[in-house]
Amino acid sequence: MADRKKLVAGNWKMNGLRSDGLTLATELARRVRAATGAEQLSCDLLICPPATLLGPVHDAIVGSGIHLGGQDCHPAPKGAFTGDISAEMLADAGCRFVILGHSERRQGHGESDALVREKIGAARRAGLVPIVCVGETLAQRQAREAAAVVVAQLAGSLPERAAGRELIVAYEPVWAIGTGLSASLDDIVAMHAVIRRHLPTEAHILYGGSVNPANAGAILALGDVDGALVGGASLAADSFWAIASSCG
Ligand code: 13P
């Protein structure tokens, strides 16, 4: 069994102006620094603020051990791509991770598996660890196609040779995102086992979709759940800290 330290990641999405983003990041860094003994987190913490806050949040958490990540990147290192941000720019801003292929980008921006694969290549070129999101819609789950959909997303988006420590997959059922309906523990175990068969043992598999302080303990205790990708509950220090504290 590979030693996979759990990772609790906050995806702030398009939330956070300078003052509230800085307050949140500063408070998390303070808690990490102040924690002693049993209060110390046993997991790694990652926050992925909007691009406008990468610089200020980096300065707020530097030296605390909290990692910084981007929410997306363009495949190219630079060029005439108005509004986009490259993996090199994220690394330059202090990021170690980048979320790729989130369902909100697949659905809202028409991102294909092939494009996600290109972005994974870009992340690696820049020395970033990609967090590749996969997950089925409610209609696909009801049609009993969930596993096939996720396997196809993995096959279409992961590079041929995926070194474990440089790759994270997040299982985020689309119907569980932002709805308050997390997947059942049985469904999470079953899907993570499916995903695990397609990954090296060192690769982390995170669960995302309505993770909150009440359900985090049970989810994070499951085998093959190596952490959580948290949306709404990552926007407040108390709830994000409570989730991270429930890592066993
Ligand atoms: P919620 O935790 O708000 O459901 O969002 C999950 C998510 O999309 C994280 O990437």
Image (tube, helix red, strand yellow):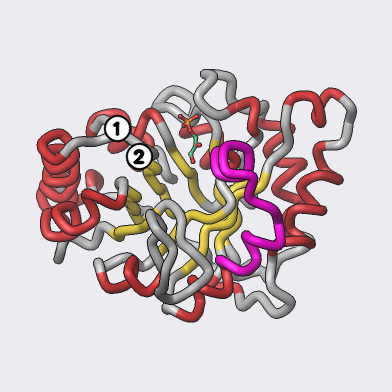
Q: At 23% from the left edge and 34% from the top edge, which residue is drawn?
A: 237
Q: Amino acid at mark 2?
A: Trp
Picture layout, residue 163 above or below residue 132 = below
The stretch of residues the image draws in magenta is: 104-119
Quarter assignment of residue 196? bottom right
* Image quadrant where one finds the C terminus: top left
Q: Which residue is mark 2?
A: 12
Residue 248: give its label: none
Give residue 74's position: percent from left, percent from top.
48, 64
Instruction: Give the side of residue 77 with respect to residue 18, left or right.
Output: right
Q: Is residue 118 magenta?
A: yes
Q: Is disc 2 in contact with disc 1, using a CB cutoff of under 8 Å?
A: yes
* Image quadrant where one finds the N terminus: bottom right
Q: At 18% from the left edge and 50% from the top edge, which residue is drawn?
A: 32
Q: Amino acid at mark 1?
A: Leu
Instruction: Give the side of residue 50 with respect to residue 200, left or right.
Output: left
Residue neighbourhood size for the residue with mark 1, other residues' Cα within 10 Å, grouped as few (<14), some (14–19), many (≥20): many
Mark 2 residue's CB less than 8 Å from ligand 1:
no
Q: Dot 2: what SS? A: loop
Q: At 60% from the left edge and 73% from the top edge, which residue is drawn?
A: 164
Residue 235: give its label: 1
